């Protein structure tokens, strides 16, 4: 019986989420637009760290 309750709750929350998304579409887009610069910054930092790590590995290999 609990499986059916879980499915019913899942369907109800999905419908509620879709209704809220339609109602607050402009707010949702604002959040997405605001998140993009932060994601780009974090991706740049990760790429920078990876590049520095590779340079360090090459320097260690050359010393051997």
Image: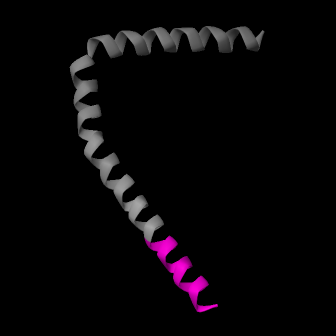
Image coordinates for residue 26, horizontal then vertical, percent? 21, 20
Residue 10, above or below 61: above
Residue 42, above or below 11: below
Give the residues drawn in magenta, as a range: 52-64
Residue 25, image quadrant: top left
Asked if residue 55 is among those painted magenta in the image, a careful observer would answer yes
Image coordinates for residue 17, horizontal then vertical, percent? 42, 16
**Apparent side of residue 5 relative to residue 46 in the rendered image (left or right):** right
Residue depicted at x 50% and y 13%: 14
Asked if residue 22 is among those painted magenta in the image, a careful observer would answer no
Of helix, strand and loop, which mostly describes the magenta segment? helix
**Apparent side of residue 34 relative to residue 57 in the rendered image (left or right):** left
User: What colour scheme governs how the chains and residues are painted in the rendered image of this protein?
Assistant: one colour
Q: Nearer the viewer, residue 23 or 44?
A: 44
Image coordinates for residue 52, horizontal then vertical, percent? 44, 73
Residue depicted at x 52% and y 84%: 59
* Quadrant that contains the N terminus: top right
**Apparent side of residue 41 relative to residue 7 in the rendered image (left or right):** left
Q: Which of 22 and 35 is in front in this view?
A: 35
Image coordinates for residue 45, horizontal then vertical, percent? 37, 61
* Quadrant that contains the C terminus: bottom right
Residue 22, above or below 48: above
């Amino acid at each position: 019986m609990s499986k059916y309750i879980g499915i019913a709750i899942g369907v109800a929350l999905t419908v509620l989420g879709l209704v809220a998304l339609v109602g607050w579409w402009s707010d949702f887009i604002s959040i997405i637009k605001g998140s993009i610069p932060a994601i780009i910054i974090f991706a740049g930092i990760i790429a920078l760290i990876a590049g520095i790590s590779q340079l360090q590995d090459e320097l260690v290999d050359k010393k051997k």
